[in-house]
Image: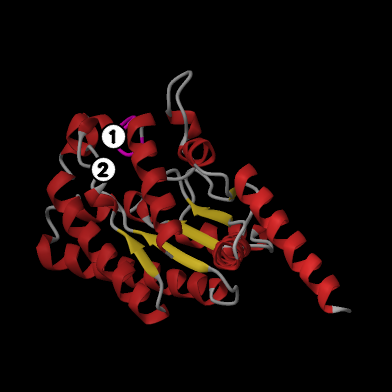
């Protein structure tokens, strides 16, 4: 290219740049680099966002639909309302650790990214009679309670061994104290029941540490009478608090 032609080309380029600058369409190399870096970060961020597939195992702490009022939401419905994740409700009202071990685990299917387990409360409720026999004394009640907790722990361990086969985050829920005082038949077990409850929850924390999974302390969530639909089931209000705590755990895990 001749010197004259090169000069004309440079002049044309300068004019084009001037036109772009005047119309606001010109983008410098620095600006373009910033834009490309921003786009790259956004692409990486979007690529890191994975669809959460959450399986909910356990008892009526999760499966509480029949206990909330008309127009109110269950725990699962609160989860679905407050999150875009995919929730599979496997929990069954009334199930014990043995029921979960024998029936629920077979319903756990891939894909699954998060697993929530809330079980053990019915094991305790079904054995409140251990605290009723006043003639046998405290030693007998404690020994029988310890045996019960040992059986629950054995079942719980087998459940966690099965769950560990999945590449999923696991959250164990403790058992809350309930509102036993509001029920005439259950009120007499309130204090003694709390002692048995603490023994069970100690097992939950122990196994969570052993299997390196997380724990959600329900006693810090269900703190008011309005959190319960009856002495032992989550209400619409309590269920919402539980759902939001689960969603927060998912975000942090």
Residue 135 x %, y %? 12, 55
Q: What element carries label 1?
A: helix
At 52% from the left and 77% from the top, the residue drawn is 161
Residue designated by label 1: 227
Q: What element carries label 2?
A: loop
Q: In this view, does 186 lie above or below 11?
A: above
Residue 232: within the magenta? yes
- Pick out the residue farthest to the right: 1
Asked whether 67 or 155 is in front, the reply is 67
Image check: 35 left or right of 244?
A: right
Residue 222 x %, y %? 26, 43
Image check: 139 left or right of 161?
A: left
Residue 89: within the magenta? no
Residue 40 x %, y %? 61, 66
Q: Which of marks 2 and 1 is nearer the N terminus?
A: 2
The quarter of the rendered structure image containing the C terminus is: bottom left
């Amino acid at each position: 290219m001749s010197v004259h032609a090169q000069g004309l080309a440079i002049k044309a380029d300068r004019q084009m740049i001037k036109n772009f600058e005047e119309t606001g369409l010109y983008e410098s190399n620095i600006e373009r680099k910033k834009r490309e870096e921003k786009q790259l970060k956004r692409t990486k961020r979007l690529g890191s966002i994975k669809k959460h597939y959450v399986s909910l195992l356990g008892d009526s702490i999760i499966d509480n639909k029949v206990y909330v009022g008309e127009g109110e939401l269950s725990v699962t419905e609160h989860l679905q309302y407050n999150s875009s994740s995919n929730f599979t409700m496997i929990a069954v009202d009334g199930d014990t650790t043995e029921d979960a071990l024998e029936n629920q685990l077979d319903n756990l299917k891939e894909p699954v990214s998060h697993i929530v387990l809330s079980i053990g409360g019915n094991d305790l409720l079904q054995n409140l009679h251990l605290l009723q026999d006043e003639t046998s004394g405290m030693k007998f009640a404690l020994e029988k309670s310890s045996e019960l907790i040992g059986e629950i722990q054995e079942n719980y361990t087998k459940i966690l061994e099965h769950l560990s086969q999945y590449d999923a985050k696991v959250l164990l829920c403790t058992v809350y104290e309930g509102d036993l005082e509001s029920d005439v038949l259950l009120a007499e077990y309130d204090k003694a029941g709390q002692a048995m409850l603490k023994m069970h929850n100690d097992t939950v924390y122990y196994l969570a540490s052993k299997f390196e999974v997380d724990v959600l302390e329900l006693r810090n969530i269900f703190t008011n009478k309005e959190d319960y639909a009856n002495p032992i089931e989550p209400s619409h209000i309590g269920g919402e608090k539980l759902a939001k705590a689960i969603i927060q755990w998912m975000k942090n895990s």
